[in-house]
Amino acid sequence: RWKPTPPDYMDAIEPHWNKIRPFVLDSAQQFKPTPPPPFNMTDKNSKFYQDVMEVYKALDVQEDEKNERIAIANFWDCNPYVSHHKGHVMFATKKITPGGHWMGIAKVACIKANADIMKSAQAYTLVSLSLVDGFISCWVEKYRSEVVRPETVITTYIDPNWTPHLQTPHFPEYTSGHSVISTAAAVALTNVFGDNFAY
């Protein structure tokens, strides 16, 4: 099960998204994902074990590939509240949210396409609706399944000194919010600008 993670060991945030009415989905259950793989750290052939090891070894690659992976992770790191601890002082760095990141991508697409006001309004509206409904759907599953985070599994079963490159957010793992909303926003933008749009 999900457990709080360092550095703050906060309770899980935003557990009540199942009470928000979606805009386009008939309910948050409309696209219920397949269940996550069952917890299994004893069978090295299990899907769960292989997924954990993929995270654990993600940066155990050649230097150029490692740098590329870090750059990609940093680009998509939209944790809007990263906490820092220096001695007895704690402060937070605030950054763009995942939804804000995709709205910025929509803006770039509108500019690149030289979209008029109506096409731009369509793009912003479809992306906004896809984001909010995607988040609702995703967060309902997070609190239904409450899957343990990789950081907890790795530090408990593999390496107690391991730390992730990015700070682990304070909510359950499955499903991935970035994956859900990125897919939804990409489909919305494809609907407006077509396939093979040059970003």
Image: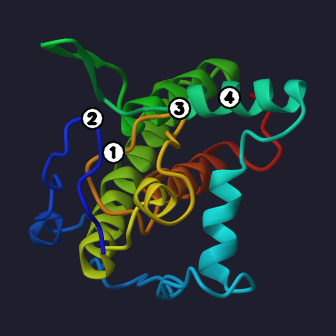
Mark nearer the viewer, 1 or 3: 1
Please give the name of the residue rendered at 51% of the width and 58% of the height, measured from the top-left corner: 154
Say what amino acid the circle numbered 2 marks.
Pro
Residue 55 figure quarter: bottom right
Label 4 Cα crowd, 10 Å radius (few <14 / some 14-19 / many 20+): some
Please give the name of the residue rendered at 51% of the width and 24% of the height, measured from the top-left corner: 107
Give whichever of 161, 179 is nearer the camera. 161
Q: CA distance from mark 2 to mark 1?
A: 10 Å
Q: Is residue 192 above or below residue 133?
A: above
Label 4: state its secondary structure: helix
Residue 103 on image: x %, y % = 44, 32
* Earlier sequence position, callout 3 versus callout 2: 2
Question: Relative to 11, is 76 on the left or the right?
Answer: right
Label 3 Cα crowd, 10 Å radius (few <14 / some 14-19 / many 20+): many
Q: Which residue is mark 4?
A: 70
Residue 170 on image: x %, y % = 26, 49
* Earlier sequence position, callout 4 versus callout 2: 2
Q: CA distance from mark 4 to mark 2?
A: 21 Å
Q: Is residue 80 above or below residue 51?
A: above
Give whichever of 193, 92 is nearer the camera. 92
Q: CA distance from mark 4 to mark 3?
A: 24 Å
Q: Which residue is mark 3?
A: 106
Q: Which residue is mark 1?
A: 169
Say what amino acid the circle numbered 1 marks.
Pro
Q: In this rendering, does residue 115 appear at all?
A: no
Give whichever of 170, 176 is nearer the camera. 170
Q: Which residue is mark 2?
A: 7
Label 1 Cα crowd, 10 Å radius (few <14 / some 14-19 / many 20+): some
